[in-house]
Amino acid sequence: MSFPRIDVDLSKIRHNTRTIVARLRGRGIHVTTVTKAVCGHPAIARAMLDGGAEGLAETRLSNVKRLRQAGVTCPVTLIRTPMLSQVDDVVQLCEASYNTEITVVAALAAAAVRQNKVHGIILMVEMGDLREGIMPHDLGDMAQRVIDMPGVALKGIGANFACLSGIAPTSAKMRALSALADNVEGQCGSFLQTVSGGNSANLPWAFGVRTTGRINDLRLGEAILLGVDPITGEQIGGLFRDAFTLVAEVIETGAKSVRPHVSRADGTLAKIWLVPDTSGSTRVVLGIGNQDTDAAGLSMPSGHTLIGATSDHLVIGTNDASLCVGSEMRFQMNYSALMRAMAAPDIQTNLRNDRPVPNTRDADGPSKHLALV
């Protein structure tokens, strides 16, 4: 096996998707799975589709091109506001896109007319996260302008939470978004096919309320890929959280003082985190670093401590005397670490269980973790 690598268990991704899709179906919510964290990896996307996802969502056209070149033909929605320089490719590759700027919508409309297509438009509304979105009081007028344009069709509205400002979705926020959907329909006379309430952070709300109002879509990536609630980091009951495992190789072992014998380098250089010297502890260096992943987002195995990382090295303190040069160490990753590792050119991806297996069970002790039911 090559190092470093990511072992991907596709059966666990299928299981996580299937479990969430089944829970949300009873609440009238469809699942659009987000593949940006895995750079649009076709096999992972297919595992999500096998699990019941109704379509895929992406933020980068390079990832969409990868999916299309691999033969993935399902609907793909671009969920980052399109760049003006990319409107022709957006219309060619994506069935719909999320938008906040009328100038961009007009350019998409013109591109769609040139390609003899109708491109779907979902308008993103600002609901408190302060990243992207149309102010609610401007939504109706914007919707009407979209409806009046040839080449595009208003498909719905959406909102985002718990990204830039950490604003969590609440029942009050979801009621407000539902009311905005009603207002747009009342003002413009056009039915909204999609009212997308947000991302994986919405799951506690979606699983906990009796009624979901007009919300009929969620864009889910982290919950399916990692099996966790993005706000709390807790495992979602019934889901696997180890579908992805980062495997790195030990390139040096030995005992060294944790206190450098020279003055510290300039503070703008790579940081080093110091840990107390522990009797019997061994220091190991792995052939992976901050250029490959987010070292702070790695879960240390039992008996191991993160000492620090530079661009190409990860330094670990361990009580495992059996580790030697050439040994492997395995880590679970948070969302940030996963995104960077999947995008790193020197990390290989090793796929396991590439064929769907029905009725996957036993998701790593769900009863001991957060159960969103």
Image (spheres, rainbow, N blue to C red):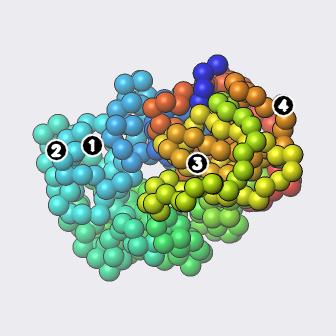
Select label 4 or label 2 by which is in front.
Answer: 4
Q: Residue at x 33, y 51 (%)?
A: 97
Query: Which of the numbered marks, if any, corresponds to residue 90?
Result: 1
Nearer-N-terminus badge (4/2): 2
The residue at 80%/37% (across/down) is 361
Residue type indicated by callout 2 = Ala
Which mark lies nearer to you, 2 or 3? 3
Foreground: 103 or 75? 103
Q: Is residue 107 above or below residue 215?
A: above
Whichever of callouts 4 and 1 sits on the residue coming sooner in the sequence is 1
Image-quadrant location for residue 89: top left
The nearer-to-camera label among 1 and 2 is: 1
Q: Quarter-wise, where is residue 213 in the image?
A: bottom right
Residue 283 picture location, percent across and down: 73, 42
**Residue that badge 2 annotates:** 111
Q: Is residue 333 left or right of residue 142?
A: right
Query: Can you give x and y, in whole percent of width and height, for residue 140 in the image?
Result: 29, 73
Secondary structure under the numbered disc 3 in the rendered image: strand
- Identify the mark at residue 309; answer none if there is no mark: 3
Point 20% across, 41% down: residue: 88
Q: Position of residue 176 (x, y in %)?
A: 48, 77
Q: Are marks 4 and 1 in contact (CB under 8 Å)?
A: no
- Amino acid type of the residue that numbered disc 1 sits on in the rendered structure: Val
Judging from the image, what secondary structure is the residue with disc 2 in? helix
